[in-house]
Amino acid sequence: GTVYDACFSPDGLLIITADWQGVYIWDALTGLEIRKLEDCHGARQLEFTPDGKQIMAVFGDVGFWSVETGRLLFRLKPEGAKSNLTFARLSPDASHVLCLDSFGKVLMFDAETGGKFVNLDHHTRKVTHGSFSPDGSLVLLGSEDRTASVWKVSDGSLIQVLTGHKGEINQTAFSPDGNWMATVSDDYTTRLW
């Protein structure tokens, strides 16, 4: 069947994959299945926590599972989400979760409590992607409105709006050193900022 997402663990020894039947942890060296996560169906996006001890999966809500046991540790149905969550990204220190709901509303939450931290609301159309800077101090959002925006994580303030694309922005990224940002658009371009 279709595999929706795959991700290496921070140490490169494990791979997680999601398909319609569940989420699986694999040994990256042997290719053997280690375990299936309990009660995790329909996940479309996966991510290891920076310490590699937990897996975050997006399946309408956001859940965190133990890598060691495969058991659900906790589930966040963040306050303020108006519909199913379709995208989530952990901050580099795993203290915040950046989420998009199916309407493209952007919310950032405390990763431990699920309490809303800030609402990043600027774009005139659906937000399609978001990224944290390597130091976790900034968030870069891309939107169907052809713009990207840069936000300060500590207080949710808008720092800059990036314009120039002629099509929807589909992906965003920071360079590993945090000095560059990239946006990818339906206009067949990638812009560096």
Image (spheres, grey):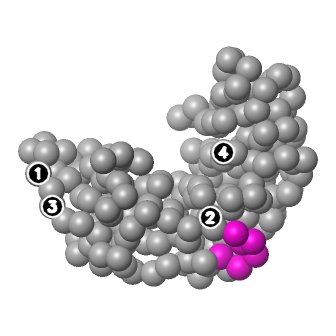
Q: Secondary structure at mark 3?
A: strand
Q: Amino acid at mark 1?
A: Leu
Q: Are marks 1 and 3 in contact (CB under 8 Å)?
A: yes
Closer to viewer: mark 2 or mark 4: 2
Closer to viewer: mark 3 or mark 2: 2
Any magenta on residue 89?
A: no
Quadrant in which residue 22 is drawn = bottom left
Q: Which residues are magenta?
A: 78-83
Question: What residue would you read off at disc 2?
Answer: 85
Q: Amino acid at mark 3?
A: Ile
Quadrant in which residue 39 is drawn = bottom left
Residue 131 image point, x, y percent: 63, 46
Question: What residue would you read off at disc 1?
Answer: 32
Instruction: Give the CA separation, mark 3 to mark 2.
Output: 28 Å
Marks 2 and 4, the one that precedes in the sequence: 2
The 10 Å Cα crowd at callout 1, few under 14, some 14 to 19, many 20 or more, is few
The structure residue drawn at horizontal position 41% and vertical position 48%, both measured from the top left corner, is 4
Q: Secondary structure at mark 4?
A: strand
The 10 Å Cα crowd at callout 3, few under 14, some 14 to 19, many 20 or more, is some
Q: Is residue 50 visible?
A: no
Question: What residue would you read off at disc 3?
Answer: 34
Question: What residue would you read off at disc 4?
Answer: 129
Q: Amino acid at mark 2?
A: Leu
